[in-house]
Amino acid sequence: MLNFHTAGESHGKALLSIVEGLPADIEIDVNIINNYLKRRQQGYGRGNRMQIEKDKVEIISGIRNSKTIGSPVGMMIRNKDWNNWKKIMDIYDIDIDDEVSKPRPGHADLAGVFKYGQKDIRNILERASARETAARVAVGGLLYNFLRYFDINIISHVIQLGDIRIDKTIDDIKDIKAKIKKSKLNCIDHKKEKEMVDLIKEAKEKGDSLGGIVEVKTNRMIPGLGSHTSWERRIDKSISAAMISIPSVKGVEIGSAFTNAAKKGSKVHDEIYYDESRGYYRSTNNAGGIEGGITNGEPLVIRLAVKPIPTLSKPLDTVDINTKSTKKAFKERADVTVVPSVGVIGEAMLIYILSKEILIKFGGDNIKETVSNYKNYMNNL
Ligand SMILES: Cc1cc2nc3c(=O)[nH]c(=O)nc-3n(C[C@H](O)[C@H](O)[C@H](O)COP(=O)(O)O)c2cc1C
């Protein structure tokens, strides 16, 4: 069974990912992983840390001569700023006495110190920080090398930033890619993007932060991934759980679920047609490619609602956990908005869920065996 783990603190020595369950002989292009890492760090509104870091992956195990060998793949992303953080984050001995005691509303700080019985909020915030998502994106980049064998392509783009929503829709993900290449915010609507950039500038000046909505979609989909037979096997459940696990994602929409809720069934359900060359197809995709917890063959469309990030350069009221007096919340280098980055992390999580489901349905111990099982199934459809 495909699975992955990550380890590492935000300002620790490095981030680690371990991916187990990949078949042997998958050709791995490390540039694909590094390109995903680069895309996660981009986007207007990210903080200075993105200039310092420029993430690069080091592959430690599981790959030989640019091919998987079936053993766990270990990956590491070093923290380029480690020397500056050593005195605060050293594994054995820290030489400063600078505890964080003013929890930020909206972050894991207060709930984390309750749960883990900590006095220093840094022991919570270092792992709660979304820096961890770089390790997930490395996993997504690695697994994209696997998805390539099945002609599955995934892209994300920003459809809302703060209260500014785009007016356009583009179906073909090749066209989406071309449009967002020229965008600072991964946005296909360049006119609205200008308004979004102004909104970010204004929020920055006021010491505030912004959320938004990002869409993650695929070019096509293999029908039959997931299952209706039990709640744990429904692919809509797996995708939603993976997406909501991204820090700051507070809502997941599959297809146009929230507008569907206000419409009549006759205007929502995607009518079924058949054509000799295309096979079964739909003229609409309001379901976002999933019916009964199973992919129906239409592209997947998933939207993520992202909250404004908690660290504000003009901080909110909080209580100092030592003195119990009202203070302003702790602040550290912070982003103004992370909506474009959340899209890239969403792509990585979707790549993981799809890779897992493909291996459940077609899995072999070697990529040739897996692809052959897949082709056989597709030929018989
Ligand atoms: C890519 C990315 C970067 C983030 N950067 C920050 C940040 O600089 N400051 C901050 O307070 N929160 C940031 N967040 C959000 C927090 O990690 C998140 O709100 C916090 O962990 C609490 O989790 P929750 O929002 O899921 O409840 C970021 C999230 C993502 C996905």
Image (cartoon, rainbow, N blue to C red):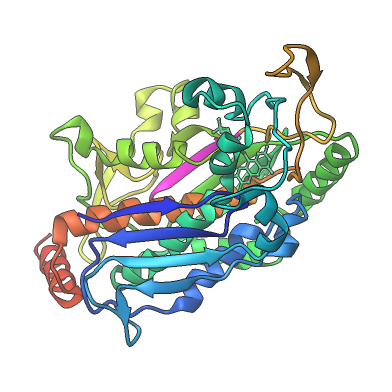
Membership of 379 in magenta stretch: no
Q: Main secondary structure of the magenta part?
A: strand
| Residue found at the very far bottom of the displayed protein | 65
Residue 315 in view here? yes
**Number of numbered tags placed on the structure image:** 0
Q: Is 330 placed above or below 346 here?
A: above
- Left or right of 15, for residue 352: left
Q: Is 344 placed above or below 320 here?
A: below
Q: Position of residue 356 (x, y in %)?
A: 26, 54
Q: Position of residue 209 (x, y in %)?
A: 76, 36
Q: Position of residue 352 (x, y in %)?
A: 35, 55
- Please tell me in which quadrant of the rendered image residue 315 appears: top right
What is the quadrant of the C terminus in the image?
A: bottom left
Ligand 1, image quadrant it occupies: top right
- Please tell me in which quadrant of the rendered image residue 97 appears: top right
Membership of 305 in magenta stretch: yes
What is the quadrant of the N terminus in the image?
A: bottom left
Q: Position of residue 13 (x, y in %)?
A: 57, 59
* Residue at 65% from the left image edge and 61% from the top image edge: 82
Question: Which region of the structure is painted magenta?
Answer: 299-306
* Residue at 71% from the left image edge and 59% from the top image edge: 50
* Residue at 10% from the left image edge and 68% from the top image edge: 376
Q: Is 321 placed above or below 86 here?
A: above
- Please tell me in which quadrant of the rendered image residue 372 appears: bottom left
| Residue found at the very far right of the displayed protein | 205
- Left or right of 361, for residue 265: right
Residue 248 in view here? no
